[in-house]
Image: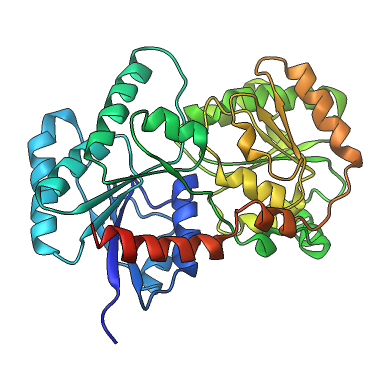
Amino acid sequence: MSEPVRILCVFGKLDCGGAETMCMNLYRKINKDRVQFDFVKHSAEKGAYEDEIKELGGRIFEAPEFKLSNIFSYENWWKNHLEAHPEHKVIHGHFFTISKVYFKVAKKMDRVTVGHCHSANFQHGLKASLRRLAYKSTENYCDFCLACSEQSGKFFFPHRKVTVIKNGIDAEKFSFNAESRNKVRKEFGIEQSFVVGVVGSINEVKNPFETIKIFKAVLKKEPGARLLWVGTGPLEEKVKEKARENGISDNVIFTGTRLDVNLLLQAMDCYIMPSLMEGLPVALIEAQAASLLCFCSNVITAEADITGLCSFLPLGNRELWAEEILNSKSHERKNESEKIVASGFDVSANAAWFEKFYLEECLKK
């Protein structure tokens, strides 16, 4: 049997972020006799997925952290890597902030470049404007443009044909399970509590300080409620401090990075996502698969509501959020797998599509 084609996937870190989770879902299902993944990361920090990647046969390469001051040495790292690894004919860029830089090197070396955007950016200010310029010039160096949603594709690739690839999950893995729910709630001592859930990196985009304010409004109406917060991130300590300042830290559980998100979702009674921007978040699909009512900021694309379980609310009106959240107490959970699969979010179908894409489109370009 011939060796599998090796696709080089590029990320910042290999932690449990949305793009990384989407890629790992795909990696687990793809036929690794035909297609194998290798990874480039831009951090010395060991990510949550690294051990599993190695177990699946993937290799991990560490690129230097990109700064404007090291652009030439950064480009040289890529040149040297691609010269040393001719098997990396396809560069699948998920790390999009600096994709233009490594795609430009890859194109000069006759590699096929796949730009894959996982978010949308509608913020304002100088930082956001600079990002827009970087993103929109990147499309000139992409052979193929992929996006997680129509909204995301229009933002990142305004002048190109875009293929929308839905972020597939293993729906059955996340389906509501009463036994798992009881076990996890006992583990955290929240058997009798109304539990609001959050999953995601604790960073600016996820709007974590607004999460604290929303939950504080919930506590005014439901004093025994708990917030189960799954994830870590650069703002974690500041968010914990904000919880203490607001006198709610005893009601907030920070779990850190967890690889059993499917089980933690069972313990929740509803799910909130007051993000400032998103593409089409994998975590929101997973929460729906667990049959949770989901309360999201209205900047998130309506494409994300694939089960009818999502409500889109304006940021700033915390009383409205609290009222809607507490109205979810009567929600009866059920198996949503058929809806997830019927909506095109089945990871097995995704894997089959990508296998054909890599072998029949990318390698024949």
Q: Quadrant of the N terminus?
A: bottom left
Kindly identify the residue that appears in the image at 20 percent across and 60 percent down: 89
Q: According to the image, what is the colour scheme of the structure?
A: rainbow
Please identify the quarter of the rendering in which residue 168 is found: bottom right
Q: Quadrant of the C terminus?
A: bottom left
Query: Percent position (x, y) of residue 155?
Result: 42, 28
Kindly identify the residue that appears in the image at 37 percent across and 28 percent down: 158
Q: Nearer the viewer, residue 139 or 326?
A: 139
Q: Is residue 195 visible?
A: yes
Identify whether 35 is placed above or below 199.
below
Q: Residue furthest bottom?
A: 1
Q: Nearer the viewer, residue 270 or 302?
A: 302
Is 249 on the left-hand or right-hand side of 159? right
Q: Residue furthest right?
A: 330
Identify whether 1 is placed above or below 154.
below
Q: How many marks?
A: 0
Kindly identify the residue that appears in the image at 34 percent across and 13 percent down: 126
Please identify the quarter of the rendering in which residue 86 is found: bottom left
Q: Residue furthest top?
A: 125
Q: Nearer the viewer, residue 201 or 27?
A: 27
Is 287 on the left-hand or right-hand side of 101? right
Q: Nearer the viewer, residue 170 or 232?
A: 170
Kindly identify the residue that appears in the image at 43 percent across and 67 percent down: 52
Q: Is residue 202 visible?
A: no
Query: Percent position (x, y) of residue 320?
Result: 79, 19
Is 121 on the left-hand or right-hand side of 181? left
Is 129 on the left-hand or right-hand side of 24? left
Query: Percent position (x, y) of residue 299?
Result: 59, 24
